[in-house]
Image (cartoon, rainbow, N blue to C red):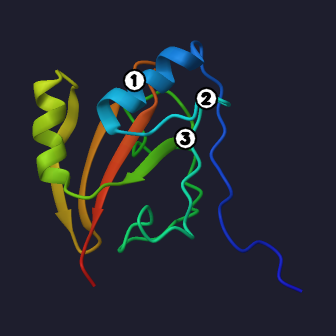
Amino acid sequence: MKRVVGIGGIFFKAKNTKALASWYKTHLGVPIDDSFGGYTFNWNNNTERPSKGYTIWSPFKSNTDYLEPSEKDFMFNFIVDDLKALVEVLKSEEINLIGDIEDTEFGLFTWILDPEGNKVELWDPANG
């Protein structure tokens, strides 16, 4: 019997769900479904599914500073298509980036905070 076979979703509380969903739609292009206020990333649809990347589940030590400057105990990670181009768009939209783009063996990373202080990691996976 298989037990867990994947991540089924990310669920979190928000002070203003409609405003936060609108921010994600405007600045990160998440196509919000008005019927429930979120979005279903359908991995069975080859036109929507990223061609690179994977989903990680990873607990962090309680004293990590990786999630800072957010005061939350979690962080969102979104796979993006072209991080360098997206960063320029986010700068033009006056979204504050946390640090510079980091180039690692896993790909390019950068971070922002959403309006409710949730840290968002943007990841352009390495080709491979």
Residue type at mark 1?
Answer: Trp
Label 2: which residue?
37
Residue 92 visible, this orientation: yes
Say if 17 sits above or below 37 in the image: above
Say if 68 sits above or below 8 in the image: above
Mark 2 and mark 1 lie on one chain; the one further toward the N terminus is: 1
Residue 9, image x and y in percent?
A: 65, 51
SS assignment at label 2: loop
Front position among marks 2 and 1: 2
Residue type at mark 2?
Answer: Gly
How many other residues sit within 10 Å of disc 3, few (<14), some (14-19) or many (≥20)?
A: some
Label 1: which residue?
23
SS assignment at label 1: helix
Residue beneath the point at 66% across and 39% down: 11
SS assignment at label 3: loop
Say if 30 sits above or below 101 in the image: above
Q: Residue furthest right?
A: 1
Residue beneath the point at 21% across and 26% down: 96
Residue 113 appears left or right of 14? left
Residue beneath the point at 57% across and 35% down: 33
Residue 13, image x and y in percent?
A: 65, 25
Front position among marks 3 and 2: 2
How many other residues sit within 10 Å of disc 1, few (<14), some (14-19) or many (≥20)?
A: some
Say if 108 sits above or below 77 in the image: below
Which mark identifies residue 74? Answer: 3
Residue 48 appears left or right of 37? left
Front position among marks 1 and 3: 1
Mark 3 and mark 2 lie on one chain; the one further toward the N terminus is: 2
Find the distance from the CA under tag 2 to the CA under tag 1.
12 Å
Quadrant, the N terminus = bottom right
